[in-house]
Amino acid sequence: MSIPQIRNPSLPPPEKMSEAYSAKIALFGAGPASISCASFLARLGYSDITIFEKQEYVGGLSTSEIPQFRLPYDVVNFEIELMKDLGVKIICGKSLSVNEMTLSTLKEKGYKAAFIGIGLPEPNKDTIFQGLTRDQGFYTSKDFLPLVAKGSKAGMCACHSPLPSIRGVVIVLGAGDTAFDCATSALRCGARRVFVVFRKGFVNIRAVPEEMELAKEEKCEFLPFLSPRKVIVKGGRITAMQFVRTEQDETGKWNEDEDQMVHLKADVVISAFGSVLSDPKVKEALSPIKFNRWGLPEVDPETMQTSEPWVFAGGDVVGLANTTVESVNDGKQASWYIHKYIQMFFACSVSSALCRRSFLFHQKAQGGLMEALNIEII
């Protein structure tokens, strides 16, 4: 379809909108949360919205870490183009970092509100993998899945490259959606056999059932109750891994039994133990917002507002969303409260009737993917 997305036709013409709707709004990260937030703000009538993305492509994790066979790039790009129809600007190659862009510099440039949707950019890597490289057969999910994306998603960027060549036996560590994406992608990249190894039992798997079923249908093998202990390298290549058995006691605590060791031969190891926000340059750029005990921005789960009233956040970076759909909803929810904040900043009243119609006007009627969720107007 080539039907452009439009502003809510019930709104006044742009030239008759109040000054508040010309407020500068910045969003960091061009993933699902930011795309959603920017789209809904633009539908509300805001005309100066800019997304800053550190990569040379947009779509965030949906582009770089969800394989083409699960989420085609055309689907992601369709949403991006709908957002652009509304006048949202995207600037690539700009990152949130103390050396480049910070919340302080945004304020100096006159931005009235900001949304942080940068995801969790660094892998949560166990110390036993310290110093291991791709040449030795070690990947994190943050290494492996973007390589798969660049080799299979035509149009994603000007960075097209061959799929990674994976041979022999692959061990994937983790039990989330990302781990199963790594497993099924490894098979498509040439792996002969794939083991998905995780510390707890099947009832503790975090992945959506569809992910696990796909891996099962494609003959990936599951090994529960194993915790990685050591990587064995010979001749400059990974040859095996050692694990210890894990067991749950009466109190629910998980313990490792050193007397039960398991040795698995492997040619490639992919660590998919989740992601973190640990880069001190990024955290400093977010100053002065507060962080919680997990090292993530502290937000009000209803408003998505941080400790700095003009800064909002959503998606993986705040640790509340577990799926793309939930990240999209974070962005939508934040957009409404950004709207309320800006209107209050300019001493404007918020017309619930008008804004509710505007807020619920969305691309469902045009065949888009993002549904308007029924958020109560306060």
Image (cartoon, grey):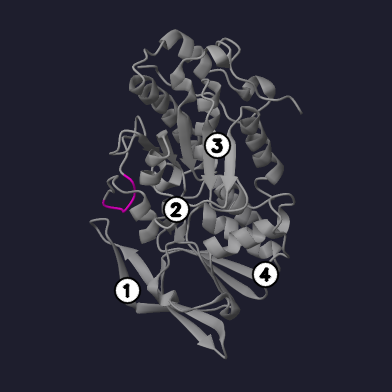
Kind of element beneath mark 3: helix
Mark 1, Cα crowd under 10 Å, few <14 / some 14-19 / many 20+, is some
C-alpha span from label 2 to label 4: 28 Å
**Residue drawn at (31%, 49%) of the image:** 287
Residue ID for mark 2: 120
Residue ID for mark 1: 257
Q: Amino acid at mark 4?
A: Ala
Quick one: label 1 or label 3, which is nearer the N terminus?
3
Residue 230: x %, y % from top left: 42, 79
Residue ID for mark 4: 191
C-alpha span from label 4 to label 1: 31 Å
Q: Amino acid at mark 3?
A: Ile
Between circles 3 and 2, the one closer to the viewer is: 3
Where are the magenta residues, as a range?
293-297
Quick one: label 2 or label 1, which is nearer the N terminus?
2
Between circles 2 and 4, the one closer to the viewer is: 2
Q: Amino acid at mark 1?
A: Asp
Query: Is 298 on the left or on the right of 338, as rendered?
Result: left
Between circles 1 and 3, the one closer to the viewer is: 3
Query: Is 253 on the left or on the right of 172, as rendered?
Result: left
Quick one: label 3 or label 2, which is nearer the N terminus?
3
Residue 276 visible to the viewer: yes
